[in-house]
Amino acid sequence: MSTRIATVTLVVGDYDAAISFYCGQIGFTLVADTDLGGGKRWVLVAPSGGGGARLLLARAEGDAQVDRVGDQTGGRVGFFLETDDFARDHAAFLARGVRFREIPRREPYGTVAVFEDLYGNRWDLIQPH
């Protein structure tokens, strides 16, 4: 049996703002944007290199989901974006207005810096050793 994590849901406040951030500032590719009726959409974005899991951008519905937007992991880093060239991607993200919470640092597992998406979810940009 072969399995993999293909898609992870990220609860967002607005479809178009999330697409703009992930595709415009982070450089992801819009894989799908399908109208499901009733204001719902099936929106998938993925890293442009084609590797790793995709994100399903799901607009929050109801108070419980709205309360989770930007804090899906209780303030911890919840998402890890691997790169083969940290300096290149870090500079590109900064130029596109991505907000980093720290300066890059070297850890035993790689070069890393924490950034936030448009809602405050924390991500690691990481180049593994």
Image: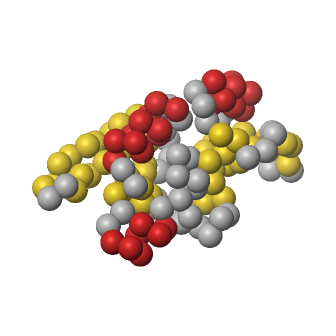
User: Which residue extends farthest left?
Assistant: 37
Q: Residue at x 61, y 36 (%)?
A: 98
Residue 102 lies left or right of residue 75; in this view the side is: right
Q: Residue at x 17, y 48 (%)?
A: 35
**Residue 107 percent across, percent down from the top left:** 85, 48
**Residue 90 percent across, percent down from the top left:** 69, 31
**Residue 5 percent across, percent down from the top left:** 46, 59
Residue 121 lies left or right of residue 64; in this view the side is: right
Q: How many marks?
A: 0
- Can you say which quadrant of the picture contains the N terminus? bottom left
Relative to 17, is 121 above or below? below
User: Which residue extends farthest bottom?
Assistant: 64
Res. 100 in view: yes
Res. 11 image quadrant: bottom left
Residue 98 lies left or right of residue 10; in this view the side is: right
Residue 118 lies left or right of residue 106; in this view the side is: left
Q: Residue at x 34, y 57 (%)?
A: 59
Rendering colour mode: secondary structure
Res. 48 in view: no
**Residue 121 percent across, percent down from the top left:** 58, 55
- Can you say which quadrant of the picture contains the C terminus? top right
Q: Nearer the viewer, residue 76 or 8?
A: 76
Res. 95 image quadrant: top right
Q: Nearer the viewer, residue 128 or 43?
A: 43
